[in-house]
Amino acid sequence: METVSTSCAHGGVQGVYRHASAATGTDMTFSVYVPPHADDAKLPVVWYLSGLTCTHANVTDKGEYRAACAELGLIFVAPDTSPRGEGVADDPAGAYDFGLGAGFYVDATKPPYAANYKMWRYVTEELPALVAEHFPVDMARQGIMGHSMGGHGALTIGLTRVDRFRSVSAFAPIVAPSQVPWGEKALGGYLGDDRAGWRRHDAVALIEDGARVPALLIDQGDADAFLNDQLRPGFLVDACDAAGIDLTLRMQPGYDHSYYFISTFMADHLRWHGAALGTVSAHQGEDMRCRN
């Protein structure tokens, strides 16, 4: 693992790192914030999955999570959204919603994307093992969250890996990709035309097929330009009602799809994860000297 950069923030360390991924066959870059902590402490971790067109840098630069993570003692990990590099297949038309920056958190089976687009395996297996090796993470206390396409990823991974994630939340997620244009394009392009195989990558379908989590927190702006065509949170409301899942859906008046929206409610989500992960104040009574 190569350290790209480190900076002090709120008494902790914000780092950016790069490594050669066996899952994707490419170099992958990710960011990790480690809050102030005792030398022998193991801290809970929240994974954040970003949306279409994003890299690790969007939330790292604009997510405004570090103060809350320092307060709560949460490690925050943000991976990239797709493989990148020479020879990695992209959308033939150069569209923003497929290919580079749009891995959709699936393991592609359809050529040419099957060669590199293994984002499910990367996010659920390879990157967690790397983070556990190099950072003071308590792997028994993990939460997952994301935005838009990353909200889709957080929901589907959280619903599938209930043995691993104690808490799941999302900002403006794609809740039923099998039923909206973004998802139909991505799942068809990466997995092929057999819609039965799409269901394990569709949160609403997973719930219909029996997947359960104790609770979900969703924030959605009512001024989001993608609300009615691509996001459709009502589908998730219906599925959770039928399944008895405790869904908190907060429709936020006037908010759009941007990081202005995400950063506004980021601390709420981290406190919600912190409550589920059993966090306590990390630097109460301590100084804020950076241990870089």
Image (cartoon, rainbow, N blue to C red):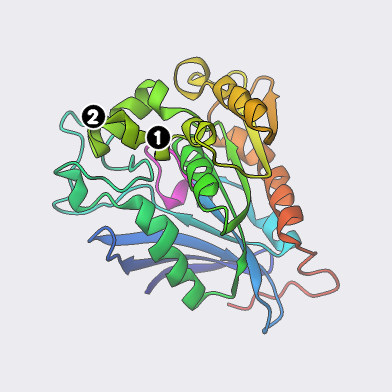
Residue 121 versus residue 241 in the image, above or below: below
- Residue 93 location in percent, x, y? 17, 28
Residues drawn in magenta:
49-58
> What residue is shown with label 1?
199
- Residue 283 location in percent, x, y? 78, 69
Secondary structure mostly seen in the magenta stretch: loop
Tell me, yes or no, whether the highlighted magenta stretch contains residue 56: yes
Residue 124 versus residue 53 in the image, above or below: below
Cα–Cα span, label 1 and label 2: 12 Å
> What residue is shown with label 2?
193
Estimate how packed mark 1 is, as few (under 14), some (14 to 19) or many (20 or more) residues with alpha carbons within 10 Å: many
78 and 46: which is toward the camera:
46
Estimate how packed mark 2 is, as few (under 14), some (14 to 19) or many (20 or more) residues with alpha carbons within 10 Å: few
177 relative to 65 in the view: left or right: left
Residue 183 versus residue 290 in the image, above or below: above
- Name the residue located 40 percent from the left edge and 21 percent from the top edge: 180
225 and 25: which is toward the camera:
25
33 relative to 229 in the view: left or right: right
Is label 1 in a helix, a strand or a loop?
helix
94 relative to 37 in the view: left or right: left
